Amino acid sequence: MLALSIRGLTKTYRNGVQALRGVDLDVEQGDFFALLGPNGAGKTTLIGIITSLVNKTAGTASVFGYDLDTQLERAKSCIGVVPQELNFNQFESPLTIVINQAGFYGIPRPVARVRAEKYLKQLQLWDKRNGMARALSGGMKRRLMIARALMHEPRLLVLDEPTAGVDIEIRRSMWEFLNDINAHGTTIILTTHYLEEAENLCRNIAIIDNGNIVERDRMSNLLRGLHTETFVLNLRDPVDVAPQVAGFVLTRIDDHTLEAEVSKDQSLNGLFAQLTAQRLDVLSMRNKVNRLEEVFMRLVEHKGTHA
Amino acid sequence: MPEASAVTAGAIEPSLNATRWVGFSTIVIREYSRIVRIWGQTLVPSAVTAILYFVIFGSLIGRRVGQMGGFDYMQYIAPGLIMMSVITNSYGNSVASFFGAKFGKHVEELLVSPLPNWIIVSGYATGGLVRGMMVGGVVTVVSLIFAHLPVQHLGLIIAAALLTSLIFSLGGFINAVFAKNFDQVNWIPAFVLTPLTYFGGVFYSVAMLPPWARALSHVNPILHMVNAFRYGFLGVSDVSVAGAFAIMTALAVVLFVLALQLMNRGVGIRD
């Protein structure tokens, strides 16, 4: 079954900006799906339409078979949303915020209280439940929005940059948490600018640019299609010019740093053998950018040059 | 972070009516909690204002005015003052609460929820009604300190108060839907509501006015509300009580439909 099905979705804002240009997209039930794109590509508009915060211009969308035009209440009952910007009442307590949100989804108060304890504990906010929400740290506020979105135990969780501005430790613990939720059956759609996050968490991916889906594939297929990767090599001894290495393109970045472009059918052993022959010791090596980032940049830049 | 234990995706769907009822009561409880939490802003000012009116207009000036409509001036203005507090607070609650939710973006909590717009409008309207009735109750108690208030028609008193509160609660909601900043929240109360209230027969009988002013006053819906309410207490009215209830009912329906249309079109809340 499809958790989300979108056909010909178009959005033109009153100022004439065309944010979506006939988007078609399917997300399978149980998927952990990444929706990526540069700023202004149409991600938030797409999510806004799914969650009823933005009126669409044309097209159809359904959530677990419920059409957004004709079965809106049923469709919205299936969705939990964690927006990009903070949108809770900063003068209410976390406990009040999550219990009220459950109420808006028809969850009776006694049930909501039990769930509030469960999710606030899971997201490490239980100790802060009675203080004012505005006193929470940035990471806690993000976690509060996740707890709030889970109160009605949605079948589809939409996360719009949930880890923006969150430190790496909390971000990784949030990844674990989201993975667990997904493993328990909740379909997740994630937008993020941290491509490492999308690569680690998501099984399928769509890249949106300028209001169009420019790529839609399994994450593994997309990464497999990556023809070259760029590695950064740290050298023991300084070099004045980039060494000549047959079959590889090397660029000198500074005295101790080289960049090497390696195609997917090339062996790194060949590169190292030639560097060793030239008495160049490599102390460490890392990817210049994350692999998904490489794909992303190529797709977006490619479309940009043809726009 | 501990494991996410039991998000049981695909649980049994509750009925839409059950969802709507719980959602509606949640909005009303949230509004009630807000009113009580900031009681110094919501409940007390009207009581203080009423005391000032009773002391200055009722006691000091009222003694020289003598009787009006066959009653002591203090008795005559008491229903009007109660109604004035109901109007101000019902309007103020809806406009402040809904505009605050827009401004703070937490209106999105409701917009993404499955609650239909008519439930959201009803919830906010009821929130305003709750505050209108609470403040009306407080001002009534204050009135009883200064004046003896006979009760001629209790049902009409309750009906007039409820309808008036509902009308202004919906009016405040509509104001909040359109408002883009705090100035626009204050314009209507300052430049429309206050003049209409003062010219709405709170402090005088329109029988005192010249014919043209009397005729003009009848266009003011607050005149009808105040007089219907006063009739419930004192049994006197400057307007037809049946006509007043017809006007109030029609206004409540029109404003509810208008608020609903604005929500459905997403005016001020959806792109």
Image (cartoon, coloured by chain):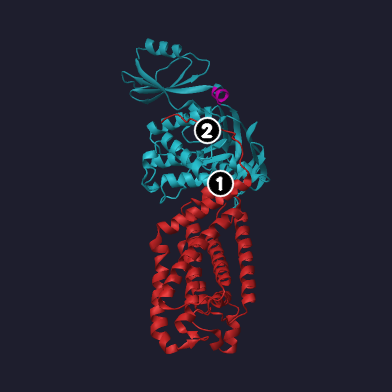
* Chain identifier of the residue bearing label 1 in the image: B
Q: Quadrant of the image for the N terminus of chain A?
A: top right
Instruction: Based on the picture, tell me whether residue A221 belongs to the magenta stretch.
Output: yes
Residue B136, position in %: x, y? 48, 68
The residue labelled by disc 2 is B7
Q: Amino acid at mark 1?
A: Val
Q: Amino acid at mark 2?
A: Val
Residue at 42% x, 64% y is B43
Residue B218, position in %: x, y? 60, 80
Looking at the image, residue A12 lies above or below residue B99? above
Q: Report the Cα–Cα distance between label 2 and label 1.
A: 19 Å
Please indicate, yes or no, whether residue B33 appears anywhere in the rendered image: yes
Which color was chain B given? Answer: red
Q: Nearer the viewer, residue A65 or B208?
A: B208
Residue A126, position in %: x, y? 39, 39
- In the rendered structure, which disc, 2 or 1, sits on the residue that comes first in sequence? 2
Q: Nearer the viewer, residue A230 or B8?
A: B8
Q: Nearer the viewer, residue B140 or B44?
A: B140
Residue B30, position in %: x, y? 48, 53
Q: Which residues are magenta?
A: A219-223
Crowd band around label 2 with a 10 angstrom C-alpha radius: few (<14), some (14–19), many (20+): many
* Chain identifier of the residue bearing label 2 in the image: B
- Which chain is in cyan here? A
Hey, which quadrant is residue A186 in on the image? top right
**A26 horizontally vs B86: left or right:** right
Q: Main secondary structure of the magenta part?
A: helix
2 vs 1, front mark: 2
Residue at 39% x, 66% y is B44
**A125 horizontally vs A205: left or right:** left
Instruction: Based on the picture, tell me whether residue A141 belongs to the magenta stretch.
Output: no
